[in-house]
Amino acid sequence: MLVVTNLTLSYGQKPVVEEVSFEISQGQFVAVLGPNGSGKSTLLRALCRLHKPQTGTVSFAGRDLRDWSQRELAQQMAFVRQSPAAAFDFTVEELAMLGRMPYLRRFQRETEQDYAVVHHYLRLTGLWPLRHRGLHSLSGGELQRAFVCQALVQEPKLLLLDEPTNHLDINHQLELLELLAALNREHRLTVVAVLHDLNLAALYAERLLVLKAGCLVADGPPEQVLRPELVEQTFGCAVSVLLHPVNSRPQVLLMPHA
Amino acid sequence: MFDLKQRSRWAAILITLTLVLLVCMVLAIAIGRVAIPTGEVVSVVLRRFFNLFTSKVQGEITSHEVIVWNLRLPRVILAAAVGACLALAGCMMQGLLRNPMADPYVVGVSAGASVGGAIAFLVAESLTASWGVALTPILAFLGAIGAVVAVYLIARVGERIPIISLLLSGIALNTVLSAVLSLLIYYASRELQSLIYWLMGSFTGRGWPQVAVIIPHLLIGLVLSIFLARDLNALSLGEEAAATLGVNVESCKRLLLLASTLLTAGSVAVSGIIGFVGLLVPHIARLLFGPDHRLLLPAAALLGGIFLVVADLLSRILLPNAELPVGIITSICGGPFFLYLLRRNSKRSY
């Protein structure tokens, strides 16, 4: 579905991602991991054409991203950025409805069907009781979920998320990832998420991509990738890896210096 | 269901605002040193309007008719159109810069337009000369677009335009441009008083020629605003968010800059600098009607018209034997409101 070939991304002269190649097939749940400044967010932004490649290509459904119109692309992929915010006090429902934009003609009003889609995802993200609240009155976690809801309302084939669990408490982190996992299972929604929490990534993603200084240093299922040596080399701190008692996924424990 | 409810609510709001605007305009024509009954105002306006098409002069022209048709009607139309232009421009700039403090006056676009206008003024010697009427909007537009581009380039920090840098670059630009204006005023010894009076922002002595200048500006701005309304909703989430929602951000931004600049430049060309309308009116409209630009833009335009018609009426009747420049009245209302917004926003740690 998504093919990345020899991708190099840079800000000005400084390369942040170098010569990265991988493929993501439909229905995968992929987590992108790596230390701060390793190029995760930039890579994610390049996957939805927000960052132009220096060299190399990204193609989606067999077509180079550059050949897609903005509107076509918005019907296929949605992007939830880091700490999203709105300048004006839209209601949660109005924000979610903006997710229908790629499907509406310029002067077309929202149809009942659009409202049905919006209401479906408001319920699914637990935002139904908050739908008439203004965005400026929401907590950080609620705001994050509202933007995830908007992305889902776009009904994309590919959902890209940049640290979606950032402002959430553990319960909401779990709920969000459970929701993504359910959509991934039931609707074959392809999910690519930049995550900081290695343990959450290991619990929910079937495949982990690890970036270090702009290079892809590991790519595989959690049990292959999350080995103590690799985590130590990548993040520079000693860890111990245990298996989760219920599903045997690897879980990383930090080792204090003393 | 929902759509119908929303549609009829929007229609009701816009129709109500239109009626209020018309009532205000009739009252503003009726009230003055010579009071004219509102019934006569309406009958004169209607009769003269239809005579435009038959080109027959029927009966004798009374002095009331001259006051209504030649003096007060064009002035009131001008005030309403300039109010609508400035409110639309403010609304678009706030959406484009994702910043509720943006306004053509604060940001320095009005000053840019006024420098261009002042140059035209000096070149053409007098604003009422047909040369001046034609030249002023062109040079005002060039000045305004220069100011917009400058603010955009100076104030941008990465993808965002923070309030602090927007206001600072606005202050800097306003300072530089007012120095340039002072220089122009220094050389304008012959036309000094009329230039200064024009710069203060007023509708005194304006008539049909200025109406003819502002109406095309307003129409182009209004059409563009309706065309871009939904894109503005997406843009208020950020340029990248808008792009991932399918908006063609670059062309959209260019059209918005063009429209808001055109609206500001037209207003400054016909009436000088009238401050804070573009800040005050969109804010009130957003409080009353919500942030959806598809309703907000036309509603703010109507509200801006109402605001300036009333402000201009006050400027005519507040002093017994003289007229105040209307820019003073809007600034007296707008300045404190601006400070209030700034204070409220800084409390929310922007």
Image (cartoon, coloured by chain):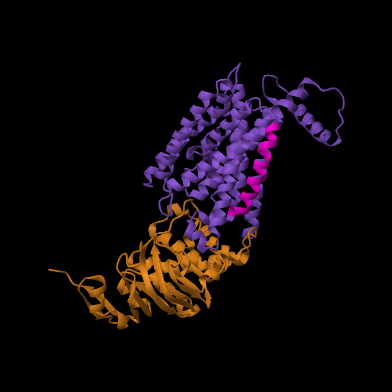
Q: Residue at x 35, y 81 (%)?
A: A220
Looking at the rendered image, the quarter that the N terminus of chain B falls into is bottom right
Q: Residue at x 45, y 38 (%)?
A: B173
Q: Which chain is purple?
A: B
Left or right: where B189 falls relative to B80:
left
Most frequent secondary structure within the magenta stretch: helix
User: In the rendered image, is residue B286 in sight?
Assistant: yes
Residue A250 at x, y = what percent? 28, 80
Residue B222 within the segment the image draws in magenta? yes
Left or right: where B295 falls relative to A29:
right
Viewer-proximal residue, B147 or A219? B147
Q: Is residue B111 above or below residue A143?
A: above
User: In the rendered image, is residue B304 in sight?
Assistant: no
Q: Which chain is orange?
A: A
Residue B192 at x, y = what percent? 56, 22
Residue B300 at x, y = what percent? 59, 43
Viewer-proximal residue, B45 or A229? A229
Q: Magenta residues, as a range?
A: B209-229
Which residue is most to the top? Answer: B321
Residue A55 within the segment the image draws in magenta? no
Dividing the picture into quadrants, the one containing residue B330 is top right
Left or right: where B314 falls relative to B54:
left
Viewer-proximal residue, B313 or A120? B313
Residue B337 at x, y = what percent? 47, 35
Q: Is residue B101 above or below residue A249?
A: above
